[in-house]
Image (cartoon, grey):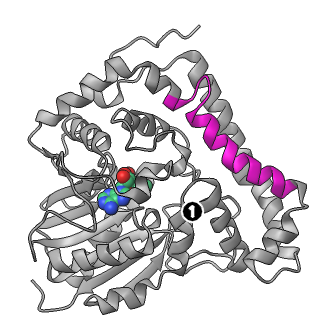
Amino acid sequence: MNAPHPGSRPASRAWQSSFEVDAWQSYLSGLKRHWGGPLYREVVREANEAPAPTVAALEHHMQTSPAYRLYAFLERRIQQMKWSGRWGFSTEVARQKDRLAPLLAEASGLVHLELDPDLKVPAYIANTETHQQPGGLWREPVNAYALAWYTTGLSFALSDPDALVDFYAERIAERLNELELEPHAILDQGCTAGRSTRAIKRALPQAEVYGCDVCVGSLQLGALRTVEEHTPVTLVQCSADDLSFPDASLDVVASHWLWHELPPEVIRQTIREAARVLRPGGLLVAYDMFEAIGGTVGRWLLSGYAARNNEPYAHTLLEFDWRDELARAGFCDIQARYGLPQDPGPERPATLPPQRLHPMTFVSAVRRGRAF
Ligand SMILES: C[S@@+](CC[C@H](N)C(=O)[O-])C[C@H]1O[C@@H](n2cnc3c(N)ncnc32)[C@H](O)[C@@H]1O
C-alpha cells in the first residue's frame, strides 16, 4: 500500500510521501551512516598501511580488500537506491508528475524568475546523470522535486545542507568585511533551487541577490520557495560561463558547489566571465572540493567518489591550477581557506576525519583595479 500522508504542504514541497517510502529512505540513511562511519574508517586504516605511493597503486592494492569492495559497492548502490526502485525519490516524483508539474509551471509567472527559453543545457550536463539522478536535473522540470526531496534527507556528505550554505554565506560576509566592501549586487552561480542564494540574502540583507542556473525546473522550484520563505532573491536562467549581466555590474560573484561540476575549459571561461561582470575591487568566491586532505589516501577516496557518483569533474578540479588561472584573468589577493561547518579550520587537517566528509575549501579573490 502506498497511502499518502495527510496534510497540506507548500508548493515547493508538495510531493506526497508514504510510510513505505519513509521507511525505505531511513533504512538507506542508516546504511549510509555505517558506510561513512565504521566501514570508511576500516578502509582508511587499511589504505594508510598499504605500500602504495600513488592513487593508481592504491586502487590496485585495495582491490583485494573486502572492506574496500563493500565500501565502493555501497557508495554507488546506496545512491541508486535512494533515487530509483520501488520507493526511490525519482520513481515517486514520476508517479506524482501530473500533480507536481502544474505547480512548477505556476512559478513561471513570478516576477523574480527570469527564464531564457532559448538557453541550451550544456552537453557536459546533458551527457551525465549527475549524482546518479535518473535524467539529471535537466531532462524534466519535475526532476527538481526529486532532488529537493532527496536533500531533505541525509546528504551524500553526511552533513546538513543548510549548515553548509550558511557557512558559505557567513564566510562571504566575513571576507567582505575584511575588505571593507559594502555589496550592492551579488550573484550566486549554480544556485539550483536557490538554497545558497537565500543563505546569502539572509547574511547580507541589504544587497540585491541573484542566483543563476541552467536547469529550468530547479529555478522554478526556487522561485516558489523564495515566496514561501519570504527571502527576496531573483533567479535567472543563464550559464556561469556566459552571463546575462552587464560589464562591471556586480560586487560579488560566488558559487557553492559549482566548479566541481564543470570541465576545466568551462571553469576557465567562468572565471573570465566573473572578471567581466565584477566591478574593479569586487570579490570572487568559490566554495568547493578544491583540495583533498589526507594525502594519497584522500585523493584516492575523492577520485573514487567522482567516478562512482557520476561527478567526473570532481576529479579534474583537483588538478586545476585555480591560483594561476585566477591571477591570469585579472584577480589578486587570492586566498584559500579549508573548512566545513563541523570543522571550520582555518588550518587544513593533515589526516582524514573519522567520518566520510567532503573536503571543502573556500577560495576567494579580488578583481584587480580601484575598489568600489
Ligand atoms: C551541486 S549543485 C549547486 C548547489 C547549490 N549551490 C546549493 O547550494 O544548493 C550544482 C548546480 O550547478 C548547476 N550548473 C551546472 N553547470 C552550470 C553552469 N554552467 N551555469 C550555471 N549553473 C550550472 C547545475 O544545474 C546544478 O543545479
Q: Quadrant of residue 368?
A: bottom left
Please give the name of the residue rendered at 31% of the width and 47% of the height, measured from the top-left corner.
215
The magenta region covers 67-90
Whether residue 123 is in magenta: the answer is no
**Image-quarter location of ligand 1:** bottom left
Which secondary structure class fits the magenta region best? helix
**Frontmost residue, 78 versus 170:** 78
Whether residue 71 is in magenta: the answer is yes
Find residue 370 and report its horizontal and vertical position in percent: 11, 92
Asked if one can make out residue 291 in the rendered structure from this viewpoint, the answer is yes
**Frontmost residue, 172 versus 104:** 104
| Residue 87 drawn above or below residue 212 | above
Residue 71 in the figure: left or right of residue 165: right
Find residue 278 and report its horizontal and vertical position in percent: 16, 77
Q: Quadrant of the C terminus?
A: bottom left
Residue 109 in the figure: left or right of residue 147: left
As shown in the figure, which amino acid type bears the numbered disc 1?
Answer: His
Please give the name of the residue rendered at 83% of the width and 60% of the height, measured from the top-left corner.
42
